[in-house]
Amino acid sequence: MPAAAQDAAAGDPMRGRQIARVCAACHGINGIAKNPDAANLAGQDGGYLVRQLVAFRSGDRKNDTMSLIAAGMTDSQIEDVSAYFAAIKIQVTSVPGQ
């Protein structure tokens, strides 16, 4: 398993940004999903993202699109793209009255 599963800082976010271009169609280049069926990735824990991509790659987690994409990724690419999305800072605000 990639080192980033234990250490989210193992990947290179700058290289990950280049890899994330493939992700942008569904997850957005900024990690905010454009597709309502896709997860928001911005600010997610890097180790969590690594574990999910490894699970898609191995077939332990199933999704036709993600399994296909992850199958072509190396451990380093998984670590890098996970570090990129983990490094994105998000701001959460509350809606008055809710």
Image (spheres, grey):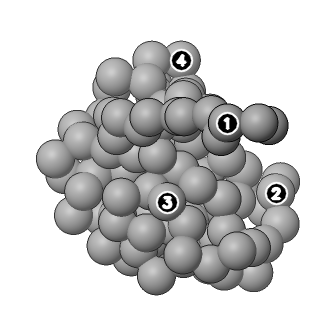
Residue at the outermost left position? 14
Closer to the chain start, of discs 3 and 1, is: 3
Pointer 2 local density, CA inside 10 Å: few below 14, some 14–19, many at least 20: some
First along the sequence among labels 4 and 2: 4
Q: Which mark is residue 32?
A: 3
Number of the front mark, 1 or 4 = 1
At a point 31% along the width and 73% down the height, the residue shown is 21
Q: Which residue lies under the disc numbered 4?
A: 6
- The residue that disc 1 covers is 96
Within 10 Å of disc 4 (Cα), the crowding (few <14, some 14-19, many 20+) is: some
Q: Amino acid at mark 2?
A: Arg
Q: Secondary structure at mark 1?
A: loop
For the residues bearing labels 4 and 3, Cβ distance under 8 angstroms: no
Q: Nearer the viewer, mark 3 or mark 1?
A: 1
How far is the residue under mark 2 from the one under mark 3? 22 Å
What is the quadrant of the C terminus in the image?
top right
Is residue 62 depicted above or below 49 in this figure?
Answer: below
Q: Is residue 74 visible?
A: no
Specify the label residue 61 is tagged with: 2
Is residue 25 visible in the rendered image? The answer is yes
Above or below for 21 versus 52: below
Work out whether 58 lies above or below 38.
Answer: above
Q: To which quarter of the image does residue 96 belong?
A: top right
* Residue 74 rendering spot, x and y as whole percentages: 41, 56
Along the line of sight, which residue is nearer the eye, 64 or 86?
A: 86
Query: What kind of element bears circle 4?
Result: loop
